[in-house]
Amino acid sequence: MDEEDLHTRLSTVLPTVREHAVSVDADANFPKASIEALGAAGLLGLTLSADVGGLGATPDQYATAVAAVAEGCGSTAMVYLMHLSAANVLTAATPTGHPDVLGELASGNKLGTLAFSEKGSRSHFWAPVSGLDEADGGLRLVAEKSWVTAANRADVVVASVRSVDAAGPMDCELYLVGADDDGYVVTGGFDGLGLRGNDSAPVDMSIVVDERDRLGDASSGFGLMMQVVLPWFALGNAAVSIGLARAALNAAIAHVSEARFAHLDSSIADLPTVRAYIAKAWTALAAHEALMRSTAQRIAAPDDGTILAVLATKAGCNEMALSVTETALRVAGGAAFSRHVGIDRPYRDARAGFVMAPTSDALHEFAGRALCGMELF
Ligand SMILES: Cc1cc2nc3c(=O)[nH]c(=O)nc-3n(C[C@H](O)[C@H](O)[C@H](O)COP(=O)(O)OP(=O)(O)OC[C@H]3O[C@@H](n4cnc5c(N)ncnc54)[C@H](O)[C@@H]3O)c2cc1C
């Protein structure tokens, strides 16, 4: 797809995303209208290929779209990110029993998500402790998933599970499970600090599966997670951080430019300290956007440094968003502490990126290992 097509499609969706963002956050509502608008614009098939009805976007275009949606509404961006993450790994390894799933995801007929994190192994999604038990005519996937975005709204769920004859915790597989299965039970709700509409809830699974539901070969789960899910998810998660930081900084600039000290006949922006904070925050944002775009290029044309770039990009953009949104809150003063300035929502939403697996701390550990020539695991 060309850039103009992408921007035209985004321009039809973003007003809806922005219109609903405040109520999605305030009432912890699932962003139904915004996801439907993404579907109507064809953007739920953003990264899927044209032969299944997708738009065939590059990693850079994907980052552009996810960041733009996040700038309008973090919850919508989170749901969108997980849908595309599911679509991308299903593209790489489409289960033989679900030949139409890519077309359904591309058209927006079905919403996808990932169910990796578990009660047992927490953020270490690469080591699921859930299992596959023998069941009549197949296997029963039994799992306690701790966070599933769009848990009550998704149709297509890509779930990780330890292989039957696993030699170690990373010997795992991915299965496509339907959220309409009786054995898919959402066991809680979501009442989070931020991303309040993303409907990320715990899910218990006891679902009969067979090899036609499996993505790829037996025990291919770890490879798919590292080679497909990690690059796309980390890039998209970084893009969410970029979009949220941009939203907070722009709101802060608007406020400090307008709000005035009447007795001094000056604006907040007339304070040099405030301008310096803003300049430093903008520089951090611009530098991390450049890192994200360079990593997008490296995902499109992988080289030896791609994985390190992926690890550093998610961690760096997540940390940058923590700092830039905090600066935005600081320079806009007490006014920003109330909701009307529009900084509190991206500030709260931006706090989720760094706890999403791999967490920033885990990524720094992995990146440090890679830089010191050590094995990652
Ligand atoms: C809004 C939201 C939506 C989510 N959606 C999904 C989803 O759709 N699908 C999904 O599978 N998961 C999802 N998650 C889960 C997410 O990916 C993480 O697994 C989860 O946030 C980890 O929380 P925890 O309490 O288990 O962290 P813990 O694993 O308990 O981590 C606690 C602390 O230990 C640190 N730590 C852990 N391991 C290491 C390490 N190796 N090195 C250094 N420090 C480490 C962490 O950085 C953190 O500071 C979502 C999370 C959030 C907040």
Image (tube, helix red, strand yellow):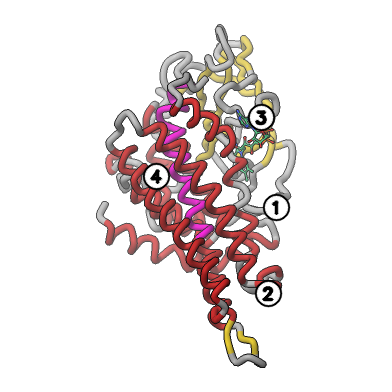
Mark 4: few, some, or many residues within 10 Å (few <14, many ≥20)? many
Residue lying at 47% horizontally and 20% vertically, measured from the top left: 374
Residue lying at 65% horizontally and 37% vertically, measured from the top left: 147
Q: Is residue 15 magenta?
A: no
Mark 2: few, some, or many residues within 10 Å (few <14, many ≥20)? some
Query: Which label's residue is closer to the chain start, 2 or 1?
Result: 1
Position of residue 23 measured from the top left corner of the image (x, y, whole percent): 64, 65
Amino acid on which disc 2 is placed: Ala
Amino acid on which disc 3 is placed: Arg
Identify the element where label 2 is drawn.
helix
Structural distance between the alpha carbons of marks 3 and 1: 19 Å
Structural distance between the alpha carbons of marks 2 and 1: 20 Å
Numbered badge on residue 53: none
- Asked if the residue at tag 1 contacts the one at tag 2, i.e. Cβ–Cβ closer than 8 Å, the answer is no
Query: Which label's residue is closer to the chain start, 4 or 1?
Result: 4
Q: Indicate whether 325 appears above or below 178.
A: below
Position of residue 201 measured from the top left corner of the image (x, y, whole percent): 67, 41
Numbered badge on residue 122: 3
Query: Which label's residue is closer to the chain start, 4 or 3?
Result: 4
Structural distance between the alpha carbons of marks 4 and 3: 30 Å
- From the image, tell me which residue sits under label 1: 193
Identify the element where label 3 is drawn.
loop
Query: Which label's residue is closer to the chain start, 4 or 2?
Result: 4
- From the image, tell me which residue sits under label 2: 335
Amino acid on which disc 4 is placed: Ala
Q: Main secondary structure of the magenta part?
A: helix
Residue lying at 46% horizontally and 39% vertically, measured from the top left: 312
Q: Is residue 224 magenta?
A: yes
The foreground one among 277 and 104 is: 277
Numbered badge on residue 106: 4
